[in-house]
Image (cartoon, grey):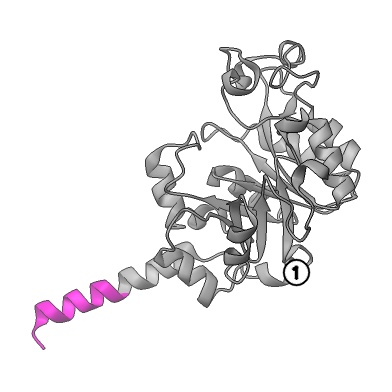
Amino acid sequence: MNSSLALFLVFIFCLSVFFIWAVQPASDSRVRMKPFLKTNFAHRGLWDMSCGIPENSMPAFKRAVKSGYAIEFDVHLTKDNKLVVFHDSSLMRMCKDAGKIEEMTWEELSKLSLMDTQYRIPLFSEVLEEVDGKVPLLIELKLPSTNTRMCPYVYEQLKNYKGQYLIESFNPFALCWFKKNAPEVLRGQLASKDSQSESIPYVLRLVSAALLVNLLSRPNFIAYNIQTKFGMGFRINRNMFRVPIFAWTVRDGDEYKKVLPKYDGVIFEKFLPGKKDKLKSA
């Protein structure tokens, strides 16, 4: 073996070791995540616009609790430091307003209606009070930048919450904040490359899909877009580290049956996992 080839093989070996180290999750993930395995999370609540129930609305959360489903929802920090439950940064799709949620006050947001219904954007505190530990929560933190100032506000409200919950985010800096300041909180890294609906830069989607952001977040679980092909980072986390992986977003029963063997939990919408009833009758 000549010296050039030997150096190349050493380089490949070192690169492989670095990659495995970079994508690894928290070491105690499987044990701590046991209560949440095989859980079905209603994506943005059990919403259904055919029944006049918008996503991330109080009736969507009440409906999920009544049906016995865990709940996934999104949290933003407003201009005046209030935590609100809403998915998009822009208000246009849901509220027909040109503003952005981080640039508005709670008073301004409280005057808007969701999808022309009687319902408004709820406060994070209102959702916690309504659910009150009846079902587990999966809370996505929406951070548009590396600024983690919303994290202490979220943690302060969760300190006194008695129910089971997880946090997740595309932004590894949010998860890094919890790793450092609140390690008892179970955290998940969202990962996607192919979803065009997520308002995150392509480079971040690419790095998150490879799970290289685990270097910062060291998550307890991964929430993986089912439209994204399994990469090496996914396979290492699944097969070597056995980290719990949740599927998002599953939208029908056939898709649900396909993902069940591959994932430890499912984030779903537009159908009822494990039930024969149609969503409208829930």
At horizontal 88% and vertical 42% (from top left) the residue drawn is: 131
At horizontal 17% and vertical 76% (from top left) the residue drawn is: 7
Q: Is residue 119 above or below residue 184?
A: above
Residue 136 horizontal/vertical position (percent): 81, 52
Neighbour tally class for label 1: few under 14, some 14-19, many 20 plus, Cα within 10 Å? few
- Give left or right: position of 199 versus 106: left
Residue 22 horizontal/vertical position (percent): 45, 62
Return the residue nearer the eye: 267 or 242: 267
Q: Is residue 227 above or below residue 90?
A: below
Whether residue 219 is visible to the viewer of this picture, yes or no, is no
Residue bearing the label numbered 1: 34
Classify the position of the N terminus by image quarter: bottom left
At horizontal 72% and vertical 52% (from top left) the residue drawn is: 41
Residue 53 horizontal/vertical position (percent): 77, 30
The amino acid marked with disc number 1 is: Lys
What stretch of residues is rendered in magenta?
1-13
Return the residue nearer the eye: 2 or 54: 54
At horizontal 76% and vertical 42% (from top left) the residue drawn is: 46
Q: Main secondary structure of the magenta part?
A: helix
Image quadrant where residue 242 sits: bottom right
Image quadrant where residue 157 sits: top right
